[in-house]
Amino acid sequence: ASSRQSEWTMAHVQRKIEGIPRGRTGVALEEAAGRDDYVFVEHPEGVEAPDDTSRAFVTLTSKDGDQFEVAVSVAEVSELVKQDMKDEIALPQVTSRLLAKVLEFCRHQVVEPMAEIQKPLRSADMRENVQEWYAAYIDVDQELLFELVLAANYMRVAPLVALASAAVAAMLKGKSPQEIRRVFGADCSPEEGAQVRHG
């Protein structure tokens, strides 16, 4: 497959996912998250807190109203948070379940940055495209995968957008246009289907 085809595939996948109404896939995750109040303290092993103790941590509040106290170094992996840095930041479009998953990625990104993903993808097996931890992290069901792209786009976590989009592209390799339509719940032309399958 050509590099141009692969670049088209990634853009096509991201565009299609961004167009999915949040209500279609959000309900199950919101139910799974529960409504009990809790606070998560996120500080990755091996990562020191900033010298400025007045802002060593930032509190992120999810759509569900749950608060996550996160090390600034971790929170700043999100460009949205970094550009609006203050003691408490509301994330009204991200459920607790998803925010916990995104923060898991951000913690590891600080400790072991994800290598740039080669285009076209080496394989449909994500273990051949990214480091072992990231391949295991993104080995999730389709519903959660699509939700992660939405959350990562909203929070502007570029490495996670790249990882999740690559996982979707890998998932579509070899599928027929009809199967691709079922995945996205939308039509695509035969030419688009061919490029996604081989991109």
Image: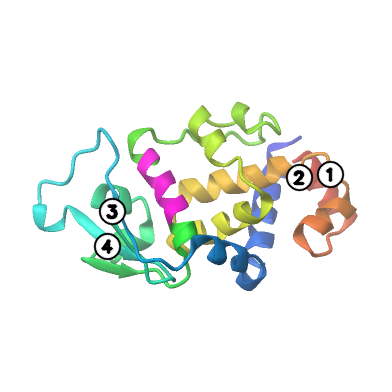
**Which residue carries the number 4 mark?**
59
**Which residue carries the number 1 mark?**
175
Identify the residue at image location x=69%, y=61%: 16
Separation of residues labelled 1 and 3 (CA atoms) = 40 Å
Most common SS among magenta residues: helix
Separation of residues labelled 4 and 3 (CA atoms) = 6 Å
Amino acid identity at mark 4: Thr
Which colour scheme appears in the figure?
Answer: rainbow
Which dot marks residue 99?
none
Separation of residues labelled 3 and 2 (CA atoms) = 35 Å
Q: Are marks 1 and 2 in contact (CB under 8 Å)?
A: yes
Q: Is residue 107 magenta?
A: yes
Amino acid identity at mark 1: Lys
Quadrant of the image for the C terminus?
top right
Give the extent of the magenta segment.
100-108
Front-most of residues 175 and 3: 175
In this rendering, the count of numbered labels is: 4
Using a 10 Å C-alpha cutoff, classify the residue at mark 3 as few (fewer than 14 neighbours), some (14 to 19) or many (20 or more): many
Amino acid identity at mark 3: Val
Using a 10 Å C-alpha cutoff, classify the residue at mark 2 as few (fewer than 14 neighbours), some (14 to 19) or many (20 or more): many
Identify the residue at image location x=43%, y=54%: 100
Residue 6, how many percent across, how many down?
Answer: 69, 42
Left or right of residue 36, residue 135 in this image: right
Residue 51, how many percent across, how many down?
Answer: 10, 46
Say which quarter of the image contains residue 49. Answer: top left
Q: Earlier in the sequence, mark 1 or mark 4?
A: 4
**Which residue carries the number 3 mark?**
70
Amino acid identity at mark 2: Leu
* Mark 4: secondary structure: strand
Separation of residues labelled 2 and 4 (CA atoms) = 37 Å
Q: Are marks 4 and 3 in contact (CB under 8 Å)?
A: yes
**Which residue carries the number 2 mark?**
172
